[in-house]
Each structure stands twice: as C-alpha cells, then as structure tokens.
C-alpha cells in the first residue's frame, strides 16, 4: 500500500512546484530564446492572483482613462431612421499598478486572449442603436502592456448611432452627428474619461459620402448628471454638409422647367381650348408627382422644409397658369364681346377720347349734313345752321322744342332702337336732329360701358400681360429664395462647435 501512495505524492509535489515556478516546466525549458522564457514567466506572474472584477486603485482615486478613435468609414446616413454608421478603431488607455513588472524592459503586445483576463473599462456608446465587434478571421482586438502598468486596449467596431437631424433647411442643411461615450457601471468617482492630448480623433481623408461632405469634427468632455450619480462623458461630433447637386438635377431644375412649360399656354390662342387645358392639367399633375417624389426619401416631418417652399411656389405658378386660362374663357363670353365691341365703337367716335367727333345724321329730308360737336357738349349760340367758316353747320329745324323728336316711319324707329343697342354711338347719332337730342343719345350710349363688370377684361390683354407678369415675378421670388437660404445656411464649423459647447456648458 505504501508503495502506491509514495509515487502519487511525488507527482503532486512536482506539479505544485511547477505551478509556483514555471521556469522548471519542461515546456518552458523548451522555449527557444531567453526573452520568450522571461516573457512567458512575466505573464504568468502578472496573472497569478489578479482579480479582474476590481478596478485599479479600488477604493482610491478614480481611474483616468484616455480615449482616442481612428475613423476609417462613415455611412450610410439614413434621414428616415435618423441614424448613421461609423466604422472605427476604438482605443482606451489607462494605468493598472497590478500589472507592473521589471523582469523585462520592453512592452508586451498581446492578442484577444489577454482581453478576457484583465480589467477593461466598461465604456459604451450612449446613442448607440446597434454595434458589433469584428471577428474575421480572428477577433480584432489587442492589448499592449508596458512595464509601468500602462495598458492600451484597441478594438475594431462598427457602431450604428442615432443622429437627430434638423431638416428645416433641406437640401441646403448642415447636420451634426454625435457619438457619446460613457461608463455604464462606474460613476465619475471611479472612472474619469478624457481625450488624449494629441489627435484624439482621426478621420480618413479618403472617406467619400454620396450626399454629404465631412466639414469637420470636434471632441468635448462633459459630466452627465443622473439620478444615480454623475458620469464622465466624452462627445465626438461629426459635422456634415449636404451636397445639393443631386437635388438640383432631380428636383429644382425639373420643377423650374415645368413652370416655364406652363407659360407656353399664354402664347396659344384662347380658342385652342383642348391644347391649353391639356397643357395646364399635364403640368399640374407632373408637379404633383415631383413634389411627392422629392420627399419620399425623408421622414414625415411636421415642419416645412426649404425644398417644400420652392416646390410649393412652382406648384402655385403652374396652377395659376391654369386658372389664368379659366379667367380668359370667362371674359371671352358673347355678352362681354358685345359690350367690348360697343365700347370700342364709342371710343372710335368720341366719348371723351377724341378732341372732336364727326357724326352723321339725317335731317327731315334725304340730305346728309355734317355737324361738329365740341367735347364739352356745347354748341354755338343761336340756331344751328349752315354758316361758311363758322363752327357749326346750320340745319333748318321744323321744331322749336330742342327735345322734340319728329315723327318717323315705323321701320325707322325700329331700326333706330336696334342699331342704338348693337352699333353704338354712331348709329344713335344718325337719327338725332337737334344738338340736345344728339348729346342725350351720346350719354345714353356711353352709360354702363366703363365698368369691368359690364364689359369685362380683354382676354388678349390678359394673356399678353401674363407673358410678362408670370416670368418676372417668378424670377424675383427665385432670387429672394436662393439669397435667403444661402445667407441663413452660411455657417462655419467653428460656429457649429461653439453652439455645441454652449449647449453642453463647456468652455
């Protein structure tokens, strides 16, 4: 029995001695160089009795963790979900006195296996929606350890973070996308995060985004106050400017051309109703489709964007061009045509537009005499008669009453009534035999023909004025639109950084 127990005891003692002194291990003795043997012995000694559940300086001063990021990809940026994607190398650096050594005078570069054996700050991204480590072909992380216990932890990660965007100036907007870093378990009494002093954020210059340009970036430090305590935070902000060229080609230029096409109806004659109606309805429907497509890639917002204002202005002009044709058709009715014809005839014969008018009238016989009537309606003194070189031509009148109208044949009275209504002042004066009768007839024919309600507007003039009014006002509004938004969006990165500092109360 004793012969069996003694060999077993010997094996146990040997294993225990190898555990305390790895240099006696045959595997250790088989390493090729002394440096390899010393490094293996240092790692074994450092991890012997190391408790990764406790932070460095537990119960003492907070651990100062320096952070830096190397961004090699940004995008895609999703306006609908208000998020963006960033790929980076995330690096943290701190000092752990428990991992100091003097056996060798150089740092140790270790792979991901060492990450599971030492304490690492529990940093997380506050505005993260999703994130993942890269583990192809192997897990992309490392640890560098220096003799004074300084640890550098680096990992390659992809983060999808929320980015609250203000699209009021879309597509001339500038956006700021934040990335907030904070400890989840340790308050500022245990961990203090800080950016490294030199180049804390590095962004690859070759990054190209389809709709944005990277204007710059900034880093800030902040202390967040929660109910459970204060937590140290780091803010990384990317400032992005949107490229407007895509929207100029896909939205602004087509909308402007549609408005110009709608103006072609002003040069089409108003009698070509099918052509003008088809052109007006087509431009309105095309503009409606364009407005719907312009906002399809954006979230349903409760406020108006700058592109909505321009497209709304274009839609208003296109719709106004269609309404203009409705007004032209309304004033092209027969009753307005007849009234305008009478007014034009009155203007040709007088009614205050000519210095003198010549009217023809028929006297009691068949002789046609010419009478000259002054603008103010006055006639020369005495009876009107034929007088060479005088202002009036005398006509023998058989009536002493100035308003007496001689008896006429029935067909003459009927013709007088009809022609006085349809032909205007010239036909009215034809049957006037006295100056007073002539003036009363003149006033009667002019009455009610100077109001737009009676005569309407000339459809030809409406089209003619629209050819000038629509392009000029549209050009002026376009100049005001572009000038205003170019001025309001002319903001530098320094201005944006200052706004963020004021928001976080950072000096």
Image: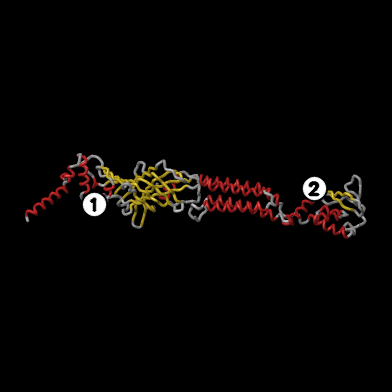
Left of 401 or right of it: where is 75?
left
Residue at left 41%, top 44%? 217
Which of the two marks, 2 or 1, is nearer to us in this view? 1
The dot on residue 99 is none
Q: Position of residue 387 (x, y in %)?
A: 91, 47
Front-lying residue, 61 or 488: 488
Pick the front one: 291 or 376:
291
Query: Is residue 211 found left or right of 126 in the rendered image?
Result: right
For label 2, the residue is 354
Q: CA distance from mark 2 to mark 1?
A: 113 Å
Q: Judging from the image, what secondary structure is the residue with disc 1 in?
A: loop
Query: What is the total number of numbered labels drawn onto the structure image?
Result: 2
Residue at image position (35%, 57%) is: 227
Residue at the farthest left position:
2
Displayed quadrant of residue 389: top right
- Answer with mark 2 or mark 1, whichever residue precedes in sequence: 1
Q: Which residue is mark 1?
A: 51
Where disc 2 sits, the SS reads loop
Location of residue 3 in the rendering, given as x and y in whole percent from the top left corner: 7, 53
Indicate left or right for 77 with 314 as reference.
Answer: left
């Amino acid at each position: 029995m004793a012969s069996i127990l003694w060999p077993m005891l010997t094996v146990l003692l040997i294993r225990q001695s190898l555990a305390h002194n790895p240099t006696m291990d045959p595997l250790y003795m088989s390493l090729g160089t002394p440096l390899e043997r010393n490094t293996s012995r240092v790692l074994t000694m450092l991890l012997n009795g190391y408790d990764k559940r406790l932070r460095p300086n537990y119960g003492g001063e907070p651990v100062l963790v320096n952070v830096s990021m190397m961004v090699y990809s940004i995008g895609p940026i999703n306006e609908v979900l208000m998020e963006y994607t960033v790929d980076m190398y995330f690096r943290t650096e701190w000092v752990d006195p428990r991992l100091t050594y003097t056996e060798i005078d150089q740092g140790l570069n270790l792979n991901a296996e060492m990450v599971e054996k030492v304490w690492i700050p529990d940093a997380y991204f506050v505005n993260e929606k999703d994130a993942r480590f890269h583990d192809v072909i192997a897990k992309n992380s490392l640890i560098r350890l220096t003799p004074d216990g300084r640890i550098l932890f680096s990992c390659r990660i992809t983060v999808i973070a929320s980015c609250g965007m203000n699209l009021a100036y879309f597509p001339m907007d500038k956006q700021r996308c934040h990335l907030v870093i904070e400890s989840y378990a340790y308050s500022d009494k245990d961990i203090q995060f800080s950016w490294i002093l030199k180049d804390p954020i590095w962004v690859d210059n070759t990054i190209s985004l389809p709709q944005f340009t990277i204007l710059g970036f900034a880093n800030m430090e902040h202390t967040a106050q929660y109910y459970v305590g204060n937590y140290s935070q780091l803010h990384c902000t990317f400032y992005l400017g949107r490229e407007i060229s895509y929207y100029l080609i896909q939205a602004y230029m087509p909308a402007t051309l549609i408005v110009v096409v709608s103006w072609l109806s002003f040069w089409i004659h108003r009698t070509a109703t099918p052509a003008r109606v088809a052109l007006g309805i087509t431009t309105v429907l095309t503009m409606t489709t364009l407005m719907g497509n312009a906002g399809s890639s954006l979230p349903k917002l409760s406020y108006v964007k700058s592109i909505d204002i321009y497209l709304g202005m274009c839609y208003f002009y296109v719709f106004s061009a269609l309404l203009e044709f409705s007004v032209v058709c309304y004033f092209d009715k027969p009753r307005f045509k007849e009234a305008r014809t009478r007014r034009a005839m009155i203007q040709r014969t007088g009614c205050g537009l000519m210095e003198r008018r010549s009217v023809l009238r028929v006297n009691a016989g068949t002789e046609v005499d010419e009478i000259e009537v002054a603008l103010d309606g006055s006639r020369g003194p005495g009876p009107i008669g034929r007088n060479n070189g005088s202002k009036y031509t005398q006509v023998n009148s058989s009536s002493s009453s100035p308003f007496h109208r001689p008896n006429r044949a029935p067909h003459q009275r009927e013709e007088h009534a009809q022609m006085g209504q349809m032909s205007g002042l010239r036909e009215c004066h034809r049957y006037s035999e006295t100056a007073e009768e002539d003036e009363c007839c003149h006033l009667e024919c002019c009455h009610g023909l100077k109001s737009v309600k009676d005569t309407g507007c000339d459809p030809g003039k409406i089209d003619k004025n629209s050819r000038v009014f629509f392009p000029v006002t549209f050009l002026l509004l376009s100049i005001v639109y572009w000038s205003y938004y170019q001025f309001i969006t002319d903001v530098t990165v320094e201005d944006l950084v200052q706004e963020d500092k004021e928001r976080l109360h950072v000096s």
